[in-house]
């Protein structure tokens, strides 16, 4: 293999490649990735174990309970975990039961609205 300089005056450098050495190096590095993966899994399990014994407060209404669950999920997982599902349920509980008739034109036909 030749390495060329961006300076035309510089001489080219020749390197011999032994594919067995390259494969051995690659295998060594890929195996090291398993060490990283194992460490990440161990830390994740330790993190989850630390939260197992921390109880989540109970609320009387489903909406208030969802707000507590959102706060607890944020403490435990940040923007991951069950955040999307909890926010969807909060949105569902915030939707008015008497959907304004004036906004039907935004949804399409009355038949479509009635279907749902």
Image (spheres, rainbow, N blue to C red):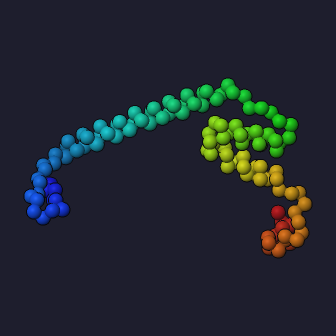
Residue 111 shows in the view: no
Of residues 7 and 60, the one drawn nearer to the viewer in this rendering? 7
Residue 112 position in % (x across, y down): 82, 70
- The residue that appears at 77% across and 53% down in the rendered structure is 91
- The residue that appears at 70% across and 48% down in the rendered structure is 85
> In this rendering, would 44 be left or right of 82?
left
> In this rendering, would 10 be left or right of 28?
left
Residue 67 position in % (x across, y down): 77, 42
Q: Relative to 73, is 49 above or below?
A: above
Quadrant of the rendering where the C terminus is positioned: bottom right
Of residues 13 and 89, the one drawn nearer to the viewer in this rendering? 13
Q: Quadrant of residue 77?
A: top right
Residue 17 position in % (x across, y down): 16, 48
Q: Quadrant of residue 7?
A: bottom left
Residue farthest to the top, as pictured = 53
> In this rendering, would 17 be left or right of 116?
left
- The residue that appears at 24% across and 40% down in the rendered structure is 24
User: Total of numbered circles in the picture?
Assistant: 0
> In this rendering, would 27 be left or right of 17?
right
Q: Relative to 15, is 111 above or below?
A: below
Quadrant of the rendering where the N terminus is positioned: bottom left
Q: Relative to 39, is 66 above or below?
A: below
- The residue that appears at 86% across and 57% down in the rendered structure is 96
Q: Relative to 8, is 105 above or below?
A: below
Residue 18 position in % (x across, y down): 16, 45
Residue 52 shows in the view: yes
């Amino acid at each position: 293999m030749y390495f060329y300089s961006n300076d035309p005056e510089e001489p080219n450098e020749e390197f011999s490649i032994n594919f067995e050495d390259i494969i051995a190096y690659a295998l060594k590095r890929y195996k090291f990735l398993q060490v990283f993966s194992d460490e990440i899994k161990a830390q994740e399990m330790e993190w989850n174990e630390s939260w197992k014994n921390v109880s989540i407060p109970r609320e009387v209404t489903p909406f208030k309970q969802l707000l507590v669950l959102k706060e607890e999920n944020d403490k435990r997982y940040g923007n991951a975990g069950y955040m999307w599902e909890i926010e969807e349920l909060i949105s569902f509980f915030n939707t008015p039961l008497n959907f304004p008739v004036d906004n039907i034109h935004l949804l399409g036909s009355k038949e479509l609205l009635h279907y749902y």
